[in-house]
Image (cartoon, coloured by chain):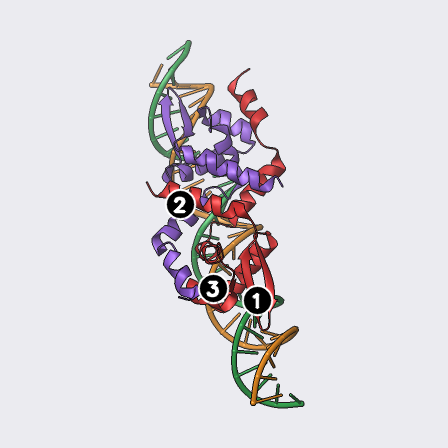
Chain colours: A purple, B red, C green, D orange
Amino acid sequence: MDNIEKVTENMPVEEQVYELAELFKMLCDPTRVKILYCILENEMSVSDITEVVGSTQSAVSHQLRVLKQARLVKYRKVGKSVIYSVSDEHVETILSMGMEHISE
Amino acid sequence: MDNIEKVTENMPVEEQVYELAELFKMLCDPTRVKILYCILENEMSVSDITEVVGSTQSAVSHQLRVLKQARLVKYRKVGKSVIYSVSDEHVETILSMGMEHISE
DNA sequence: TGAACATATGAATATTCGTTCATATGTATT
DNA sequence: AATACATATGAACGAATATTCATATGTTCA
């Protein structure tokens, strides 16, 4: 069995590859990374996130929508506010792995 | 200490955020993901990678250049061929974490 | 040296993406 | 009801990106 066959066998199927790329796409924008760090351990309102991230309310809201569609964050409404938090434990692990990587 | 202060303190500095996003940017394209899976455990020539990935030689070469610039892959020349491999153990871990995430 | 092969590269193009601006929606307060 | 506040959303714009095509570079072999 040559290299090509072996590698082809172990290659994830097309759909998995796309999903995987899609997941990492969520983490490839600085604004989204900051947002996720905000709500990794505590939940936080959109306005507080906006302040910490240092972007506009609109930009943050747009990115939260993207993260929501990817099911990476969840939210609950409290009065006028909407409070977001990370909905998946893997996110922290993946961010940590990445952080470990760049710290070298 | 309120939420904003606490989160701001734990937020990676701007430069780290950008580097982190940059790292994940390398993994957010299906072609690059496939290429990395090809050379994760074995080294492989550009033409073999091209065949497995199912793209054009040019597209693969362009993406290998991107991965090379990000120092995620290394290469050696053998005759007419150039043989690439992953230069960082973290890549496999990060891909695995991502794969675990989407398998749910 | 010339032909064949392997890889790299530059320009062009189409698409995707993130932000901004203006405004809509929804909730609380007076 | 009117106002203020918090968030969401649509359109527009510019920047970034992946691919394709044509071709350049470099290597081997006859």
Q: Is residue B8 above or below residue D26?
A: above
Q: Residue at x 57, y 38 (%)?
A: B17
Q: Residue at x 45, y 42 (%)?
A: A26
Residue D9 vs residue A8, the one in the foreground: A8
Give the SS element for disc 3: helix
Q: Gap between marks 1 and 2, in whole Å?
A: 29 Å
Question: In terms of image quadrants, where is residue A77?
Answer: top left
Residue D19 vs residue B65, the one in the foreground: B65
Which residue type does callout 2 highlight? Met
Which residue type does callout 3 highlight? Ile
Q: Is residue B94 left or right of residue B100?
A: right
Q: Is residue A16 left or right of residue B39?
A: left
* The N terminus of chain B lies in quadrant: top right
Q: Gap between marks 1 and 3, in whole Å?
A: 11 Å
N-terminal label among 1 and 2: 1
- Mark 2 lies on residue: B99
- Mark 3 lies on residue: B49
Q: Position of residue B52 (x, y in %)?
A: 42, 64
Q: Position of residue B20 (x, y in %)?
A: 56, 41
Q: Is residue A17 above or below residue B1?
A: below
Q: Position of residue A85 (x, y in %)?
A: 42, 28
Q: Which mark is residue A21?
A: none
N-terminal label among 2 and 3: 3
Q: Is residue B54 visible?
A: no
Q: Residues within 10 Å of mark 3 (few under 14, many from 20)?
A: many
- Mark 1 lies on residue: B82
Q: Position of residue C4 (x, y in %)?
A: 52, 84
